[in-house]
Image (cartoon, rainbow, N blue to C red):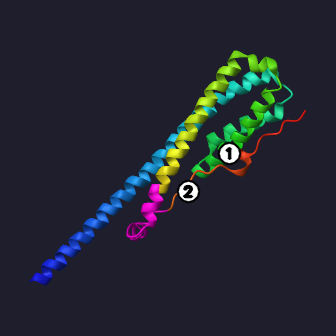
Amino acid sequence: MLGWIIAGIIIVAVILFVIVTYNALVRLRNKVKNSFAQIDTQLQRRFDLIPNLVETVKGFASHEKELLENVTASRSGYLSAGSNEEKLAMNHQLTSSLKTLFAVAENYPELKANTNFLKLQDELSETEDKIAFSRQFYNDAVTIYNNKRQMFPGNIVAGIFGFQEEALFNTDDEAKEVPRVEF
């Protein structure tokens, strides 16, 4: 009789452990998804500012047509991207184009003094700060989730229920380079 009670207690303990661990993994996975959605929201804000920025710059830098087309193409690519990976690739492409755009703008004193351009530049700068914070929050959420998913005994429950590893939001090498502007 005592053996059945002990076996019952062990079975209940195992079931409770699985339930608690599963729920923790679901909560953390949802936090990761929410964190990425916050990045997506800030990137969308950034992309919404771009047409105004491009139009402002067009008036001053009409011969920079290719650069402006790259910025516009990056925006369109982001808006039509289906997966998070495609969105991140378009974001990296846009970041590179925007760096070059602002480097070009440095060569136009009239543009640098234009209030519309300055306002847009400030809004983009504020948005970039929010994106950086959102990326940091996302990476923190991913790290906590991946740790829970990979560490014993959570890895057993994660394996049984198919919890997949999430990727950190890394800056690509191209975005780390300073843009070169040549005339």
In this rendering, position of residue 116 left or right of residue 163: right
Whether 105 is drawn above or below 73: the answer is above
Question: Residue at horizontal 63%, vertical 49%?
Answer: 86
Mark 2, residue position = 167
Q: Quadrant of the C terminus?
A: top right
Which stretch appears magenta? 144-164
Question: Residue at horizontal 68%, vertical 24%?
Answer: 52
Farthest residue, direction right: 183
Secondary structure of the residue carrying tag 2 is loop
Return the mark for residue 4.
none
Any magenta on residue 145? yes
Q: Is residue 99 visible?
A: yes
Q: Amino acid at mark 1?
A: His
Q: Position of residue 5 (x, y in %)?
A: 13, 78
Question: Residue at horizontal 62%, vertical 39%?
Answer: 79
Q: Which is more N-terminal, label 1 or label 2?
A: 1
